[in-house]
Image (cartoon, rainbow, N blue to C red):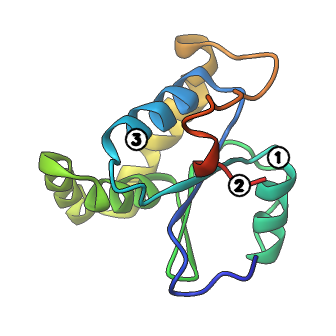
């Protein structure tokens, strides 16, 4: 898979994180146009994309959005995703006006506590049959 401007945005997420899995399910339920594709950071596809874009393959604490052949992480990735969501979710993109160090500090605080607050799975979620085409292999 060669990233280019015609490919859909790809969300890489921590596949064993309860919060991250919940966010992916939230996106899929609202993304009726099937704009986004998904891959756990731990998966072969996720690891290959991290490598292709020069990202550390062992860092699983960041939400990653690959969009238009560019990589966005942490709060910027989350806000750019909101910008593409249908309905009022796009309004959250105004948060981009907050300086990135401040946004990422909040993001990092949530990331440090996500397993404690939302749980940790033993393995990555297996997508349902209806969602399978949204996940990279």
**Secondary element at tag 3:** helix
CA distance separating discs 2 and 3: 16 Å
**Secondary element at tag 1:** loop
The furthest residue to the bottom: 5
CA distance separating discs 1 and 2: 9 Å
**Picture quadrant of residue 34:** bottom left
Q: Mark 2 points at which residue?
A: 136
Q: Name the residue under label 1.
A: 43
First in residue order: circle 2 vs circle 3: 3
Identify the mark at residue 27; answer none if there is no mark: 3
Q: Residue at x 62, y 49 (%)?
A: 133
Q: Which residue is drawn at 31% across and 40% down?
A: 30
First in residue order: circle 1 vs circle 2: 1
Task: Give the label, 2 or 3, closer to the camera.
Answer: 2
Q: Do callouts 1 and 2 mark residues in contact (Cβ within 8 Å)? A: yes
Does 6 sit above or below residue 14? below
Task: Give the side of residue 2 with respect to residue 70, left or right.
Answer: right
Can residue 76 be spotted in the picture?
yes
Q: Which residue is drawn at 74% across and 48% down?
A: 41
């Amino acid at each position: 898979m060669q990233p280019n401007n015609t490919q859909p945005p790809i969300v890489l997420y921590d596949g064993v994180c309860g919060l991250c899995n919940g966010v992916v399910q939230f996106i899929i339920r609202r993304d009726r146009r099937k704009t986004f594709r998904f891959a756990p950071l731990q998966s072969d596809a996720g690891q290959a994309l991290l490598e292709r874009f020069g990202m550390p393959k062992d860092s699983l604490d960041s939400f990653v959005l690959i969009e238009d052949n560019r990589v966005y992480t942490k709060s910027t990735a989350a806000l750019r995703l909101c910008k593409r969501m249908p309905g009022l979710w796009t309004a959250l993109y105004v948060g981009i006006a907050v300086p990135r160090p401040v946004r990422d500090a909040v993001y990092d605080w949530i990331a440090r506590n996500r397993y404690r607050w939302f749980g940790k799975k033993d393995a990555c979620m297996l997508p349902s049959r209806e969602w399978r085409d949204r996940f990279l292999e």
